[in-house]
Amino acid sequence: MVVFPQSVSQRPISRRQALLAGAVGLGAVELGAFGQFAGRWLQAAATQPAALSARPKSVILIFNCGAPSHLDLWDPKPNATDTVRGPFHTISTNVPGIQVSELLPRMATRADKLAIVRTLHHQHTQHNSGMYWSIVGRPYRIDNTLINPSRADHPSFGTLVGWLSQRESQRNGAPPYVITPSPHCDSFQYITPGQFGGCLGPRFDPFVVNADPNAKQFKVPNLGRLIEVPAERLADRRHLLSQLERASAADCTASRDYQTNRAEALALMTTGRAGEAFDLSREPNHVRDRYGRHPWGQSHLLARRLIEAGTRFVTTVNGPSIVWDTHKDNFNLLKNQLVPPMEQAFAALLDDLAERGLLETTLVIWMGDFGRTPVINKDAGRDHWPDCYSMVLAGCGVPGGQVIGESDSTAAFPLHRPVSPADIHATVFRLLGFDSRQITYQSADGRPIPLSDGTPVPELL
């Protein structure tokens, strides 16, 4: 069983609790569990000041929990010894001079859309802290796997993109930040910090699907009006709530904005727009087959539907727990279990976004916790290696057909053009139209923290 922070769980509240909470609590009862979530992120727009203007762009993060081997995918070393290079051959791509592993034939034909960064690096060697550094752009206070989220965490770039969209009062009827099918985690007992609201508060927690989109009966609950509450009864409740608020609520901008936000949430619940975005049965079978009838493929398809509906950041987690942690049998696992569904879904997503005219405004990021050791261990596996690894970006104006950085002869360390996670984060914010050094949020101890301490990578802009 996956255990989430209390704010993420969808626990029903009693009528007595709602009445004690006052008018806002009554509104939460009207809307059900999703309404409580929607109320949090819609309310946030009324409490945040106006932000710098930004282009309406979105992000899909494909995250490989457990850390895929960079040597066996994006940064092969065909001239290294067999104790380093492994059994896979290197193949050419549709961009002269760029080669990748034979495990990536689909991506080889789409290299003109890809920017491959081969010199990403940090210093955390454990999964949860490594994932934190990757998605937050800052080191965790300890390098450990046995950690869980807290309200002291710095927020991930997914959380911050949702926060920024709410600061701009971009209320389009879709949750700003969604994770599918399940959160980053080392195990179902230890959930990666940073991916929730952290120091920004529970109203900025993502909407976690926490279900298999490939399941036959897949349906996200609580996205529509409760069956036992007819439309007429809901209208009566809304009228009663408005009367209570007129009698008790302060006449201030925040109060008026909150009422507007709740009205939009109610419209969301009654029109069914969010439910439609999560309803994969609306997709033709050939489209679903194109992505792959597996959790990764259907999560990528769900990400595209959410982006179309107005969600600003979607994380698709490729694997339950740390399935890419190939300490043993690395090569068989990559070839027969891990890479084929990942590559199928990745290629389908890029093609589908491009065909729909969405790739120009959607940044697609492929990354993991860190890389794997250059030297193959005694169990035909590779161990943790954060000193040099690869990631891939596409879309949103990123120039494709290029490799950024060069690793040494065994892909152990950056040789030229090292890039940090903070630099990637600064780049992402710049691509979305934000100055990561000028916009700050407040840490748990009250300090102003910039979106990123990194420097945007010019080759990606």
Image (cartoon, rainbow, N blue to C red):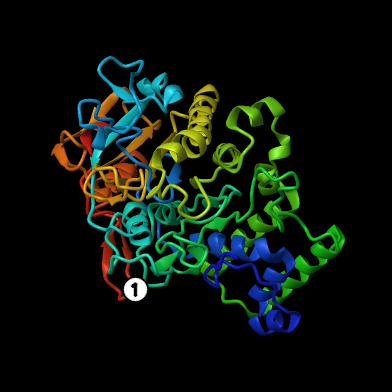
- Quarter of the rendering containing residue 192: bottom left
Asked if residue 121 lies left or right of residue 172, the reply is left
> Please, is residue 225 above or below residue 396 in the view?
below
- In this rendering, the count of numbered labels is 1
Asked if residue 306 lies left or right of residue 410, the reply is right
Asked if residue 389 lies left or right of residue 320, the reply is left
The residue singled out by tag 1 in the image is: 444
In-front residue for pair 222/324: 324
> Please, is residue 83 above or below residue 242 in the view?
above
Residue at 64% from the left image edge and 67% from the top image edge = 10
Residue 179 coordinates in the image, percent (x, y): 53, 52
Q: For the residue carrying disc 1, how many other residues have a C-alpha within 10 Å: few (<14), some (14-19), or many (20+)?
A: some
Residue at 49% from the left image edge and 36% from the top image edge = 342
> Please, is residue 191 above or below residue 93 in the view?
below
In-front residue for pair 250/196: 196
Residue at 37% from the left image edge and 65% from the top image edge = 145
Residue 242 coordinates in the image, percent (x, y): 71, 70
Residue 369: in sight, yes or no? yes
* Quadrant of the image containing the C terminus: top left
Residue 63 coordinates in the image, percent (x, y): 43, 46
> Please, is residue 161 above or below residue 149 in the view?
above
Residue at 71% from the left image edge and 64% from the top image edge = 31
* Quadrant of the image containing the N terminus: bottom right
Residue 87 coordinates in the image, percent (x, y): 34, 30
Dot 1 falls on a residue whose secondary structure is: loop
In-front residue for pair 136/385: 385
Residue 54: in sight, yes or no? no
Q: Amino acid at mark 1?
A: Ala
Farthest left residue in view: 415
